[in-house]
Amino acid sequence: MESRNLKSVRKTNKMKWIYLSLLILIMMAGVGYLFRKELSIFAFNSLLKEDLKTSLDKSYKAVGYEDSDNQSFKNEPFSLLLLGIDQRDKEASRSDTIIYSVIRPKDNKVLLVSIPRDTYTEIVGRDVKSKINSAFAYGEEKMSIDTVENLLKSKVNYYGTVNFNAIINLVDAVGGVKLPITEVIENKNPVHIKLRIDPNKLIYDGQDALNYVRYREDSDFKRTERQRIFIESMMDKVLELKNITKVPDLIDIAGSNFTTNMHPDFIFSLAETLYLNDTPPDFESYMLHGNGKMIGSTWYYDVDTEDLDYTQNLISNWLDSEIDKENLMLPNDKN
């Protein structure tokens, strides 16, 4: 009986480690803490690590500046550029979601800075100014990284790219998600894809969830807010114990739609550091402020100069390892 119980605990903890790695892959999410840490880490290292490493190796894609020092986990603050790609038919992919994140493993804190997709800025490598999401269409991750670094004046240490089309399969695999939709959401502009979401459903399926994060006929601010709401709802769903057994399928779905230049060993070290904390990571969010403007016949998001300076200082503050947790700038501190 004791042997059977131990086997059951190991199996459950193994699934919990898979869950942890999955959430790191799809958006650096937090974890639940249900069982003994020592046993969980032992089970992961002895039963799962090599198989998961093989899966993560398939998602690795270098952009040209990686070296051994870059892939050595030092438990110091680092930046991660998160790109959500909305690829449709044969169109060139553009990054519909652009989030510059700073992870401080020692402090168990994560800063998420949303950059509106229509932000008017220099596209590094093309010598033109245009919408920031066009960088991915012309130069994929490398041009996106160079362009974001130029805008924010801060280094991008790593990137993670997720294809939005994976949302349908991910959501359906967990049985749908809850979304706070109280009015009909519908695209009415004829140049936009047709979509409609009915309100007040108890659970929304994968297609509704994809439409929810795609909808863009109100504002960039509300759009990025919907994306954060979806991520939180998805995490809540995966946290349900009945869905823990579905995590291997979720990894397969996410893995085939995910690329990164973080080596598996780096991801495992980060996962273990976050896991050994007593609480899930503390997230702080911010979005670049600005206003819409027309240049010719095209609408752009024009970032406020003072707010851009503030955001650059905020990121610099979080990346500074000499600044302790108590002295970090918080987005809500801005007057």
Image (cartoon, grey):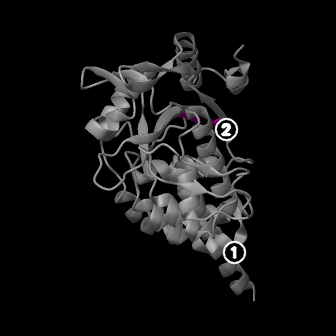
Residue sitting farthest toward the bottom:
1
Few, some or many residues within 10 Å of mark 1 (<14, 14–19, 20+):
some
Residue sitting farthest toward the top:
306
Secondary structure under the numbered disc 1 in the rendered image:
helix
Measure how far apart labels 1 and 2 are at the Cα level.
Answer: 30 Å
In front here: 18 or 242?
A: 242
In front here: 243 or 71?
A: 243
In the figure, is residue 280 to the left or right of 28? right
Does residue 23 appear in the picture of this structure? no
Residue 87 locus on image (x, y percent) = 37, 51
In the figure, is residue 235 to the left or right of 149? right
| Circles 1 and 2: CB atoms closer than 8 Å | no
Q: Is residue 102 magenta?
A: yes
Lower position in the chain sequence, tag 1 or tag 2: 1
Residue 165 locus on image (x, y percent) = 44, 58
Q: Report the number of numbered marks.
A: 2
Q: Where's the N terminus, which quadrant? A: bottom right
Residues rendered magenta in the picture = 101-110
Residue under label 1: 9
Q: Residue at x 74, y 51 (%)?
A: 182
Residue 93 locus on image (x, y percent) = 34, 46
Q: Is residue 138 magenta?
A: no
Foreground mark, 1 or 2, reads: 2
Identify the disc placed on residue 43: none
Few, some or many residues within 10 Å of mark 2 (<14, 14–19, 20+):
some
Location of residue 52 (image quadrant): bottom left
Residue under label 2: 283
The amino acid sitting under disc 2 is Phe
* Magenta span main SS: strand
In the figure, is residue 260 to the left or right of 37? left
Q: Where's the C terminus, which quadrant? A: top right
